[in-house]
Image: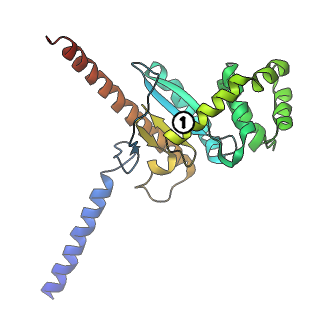
Amino acid sequence: MRRFTQAIYAVFLLGLGLVSASAGASPAMPQSGVEYRVLGRPQPTEAGKKVEVIEFFGYFCPHCNALEPLIAEWVKKQGDNIVFKRVHVNFHNLVQQQKLYLTLEAMGKADEYQIKAFNALHVERNRLQSDAEVMSFVAKSGLDKQKFTDVYNSFAIQSKLNRTNQLLESYQVDSVPMVAVDGRFLTSPVESVRTMGRVSEETQNRSLLQVLDFLVSKAQKEKAGAAPAAAADSGKKK
């Protein structure tokens, strides 16, 4: 009887250990290889002393659509801490959607029309899969159609398409939404709740923002630490 009791107690302690171990990882205190990944080959950034954050997304993606209002609000709260960029992926050969985003970006209208483009597809059922469907969106949205058309068909947009596809390969993007921080860290709504079990999409998205807070803070601290070290090295006698 005593041995049986001891065995039950051992299983109980083991269970506590497992709970404790899983509790150590959370969106607020994420761990590499759990809530986020580290790129094997860091990518160059253009943010200077700020932290670059890139959201890889697609207008076709319902999960990107659900995330958009939350991440837009998060970007505003971050303010001057970050340089935020969006990159529309080329999944399903939806080049027209890529060109739509790149044209809005080139016109300085991306932030203003991002939600409108998502609504066109997910609410109004405009698939945005052809030039005609894109132009229908443009006509209804109040954009200058001639100016949009000129930019949309320009060589500059084609060049940006090529650059975008290179970025997708460099960052190993295989699903969306996915977010890169400081050219080194990758995470997503699904990864951010890896230790939480089955949760709602809203919980996933809010957990993602917690992980992003952590990664931006981590990158900022590392940048701040690197600056004095670089200054000290430059001051050494040769």
Quarter containing the C terminus: top left
Q: What element carries label 1?
A: helix
Q: In this view, does 141 lie above or below 184?
A: above
Label 1 belongs to which residue? 167
Quarter containing the N terminus: bottom left
Residue 188 makes an appearance in the image: yes
Residue 149 appears at what percent x and percent y?
Answer: 81, 24
Identify residue type, mark 1: Leu
Residue 30 appears at what percent x and percent y?
Answer: 36, 45
Q: Residue at (49%, 39%) from the top-left corner?
A: 170
Q: Is residue 47 above or below residue 1?
A: above
Q: How crowded is mark 1: few (under 14 residues within 10 Å), some or many (20 or more)?
A: some
Residue that protrudes farthest toward the front in the picture: 238
Residue 90 appears at what percent x and percent y?
Answer: 65, 42
Q: Residue at (37%, 42%) from the top-left corner?
A: 28
Residue 112 makes an appearance in the image: no
Quarter assignment of residue 94: top right
